[in-house]
């Protein structure tokens, strides 16, 4: 997947209905893109549309969000609001825990270059037979060794 091929939001009719507050980053894997967001900051030159507070625009496609982020002074780079049905928590460096609670979080869109989570992604990642660099599994570069 290239930067121009990021997936569209899973349900375009829900774009713009998700709460502004979301987790930030993490979890290593993703299930669905809910929307793309462009955060705007009046203190950085964005139009003041929220009494001096930051605000965002929501989009169903990365291309629309990218255009918006380039057109508005004081806008951040596009973020992806994603759904993680399951994810991996790194509680300490190199210590990983499988979390099975759903969560919604904002990610840099580049994280979407990782393959979408499959039924075996987390199990392969946590397996004692995983390759020496477990992150290769998340990058789509390898699976656990036979």
Image (spheres, helix red, strand yellow):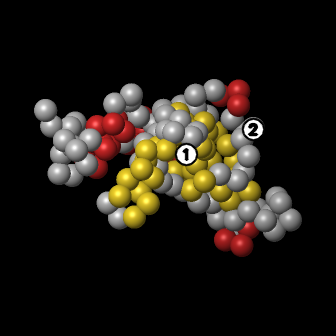
> From the viewer's perspective, is residue 14 above or below residue 16?
above
C-alpha span from label 1 to label 2: 14 Å
Quarter holding the N terminus is: top left
> From the viewer's perspective, is residue 67 above or below residue 41?
above
Residues 127 and 68: in front is: 127
Give the mark, 1 or 2, whose residue is nearer the N terminus. 2
- Residue at position x 56%, y 56% from top? 24
For label 2, the residue is 17
Label 1, secondary structure: give it.
strand
For label 1, the residue is 80
Disc number for residue 135: none
- Residue at position x 59%, y 43% from top? 103
Residue 84 is at least partly visible in this image: yes
The quadrant in which residue 75 appears is bottom right
Q: Position of residue 33 (x, y in %)?
A: 54, 36
Q: Residue furthest right?
A: 51
Residue 52 appears left or right of 4: right
> From the viewer's perspective, is residue 76 above or below residue 86?
below
Residue 98 appears left or right of 141: right
Residues 76 and 68: in front is: 76
Q: Residue furthest bottom?
A: 43
Q: Position of residue 66 (x, y in %)?
A: 54, 47
Residue 100 appears left or right of 145: right
The quadrant in which residue 95 appears is bottom left
Residue 108 is at least partly visible in this image: no
Q: Position of residue 64 (x, y in %)?
A: 59, 40
In contact (CB < 8 Å): disc 1 and disc 2: no
Graded by Cα atoms within 10 Å as few (under 14), some (14 to 19) or many (20 or more), the crowding at tag 2 reads few
Label 2, secondary structure: give it.
loop
Residue 66 appears left or right of 55: left
């Amino acid at each position: 997947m290239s930067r121009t091929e990021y997936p569209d939001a899973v349900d375009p009719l829900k774009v713009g209905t998700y709460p502004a507050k979301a987790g930030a980053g993490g979890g290593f894997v993703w299930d669905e893109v809910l929307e793309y967001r462009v955060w705007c900051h009046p203190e950085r030159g964005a139009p003041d549309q929220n009494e001096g507070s930051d605000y965002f625009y929501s989009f169903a496609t990365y291309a629309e969000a990218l255009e918006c982020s380039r057109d508005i002074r004081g806008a951040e780079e596009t973020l992806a609001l994603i759904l993680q049905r399951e994810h991996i928590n790194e509680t300490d460096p190199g210590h990983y825990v499988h979390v099975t609670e759903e969560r919604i979080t904002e990610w840099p869109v580049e994280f979407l270059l990782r393959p979408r989570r499959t039924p075996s992604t987390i199990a392969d990642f946590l397996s004692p037979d995983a390759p020496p660099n477990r992150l290769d599994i998340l990058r789509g570069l390898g699976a656990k060794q036979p």
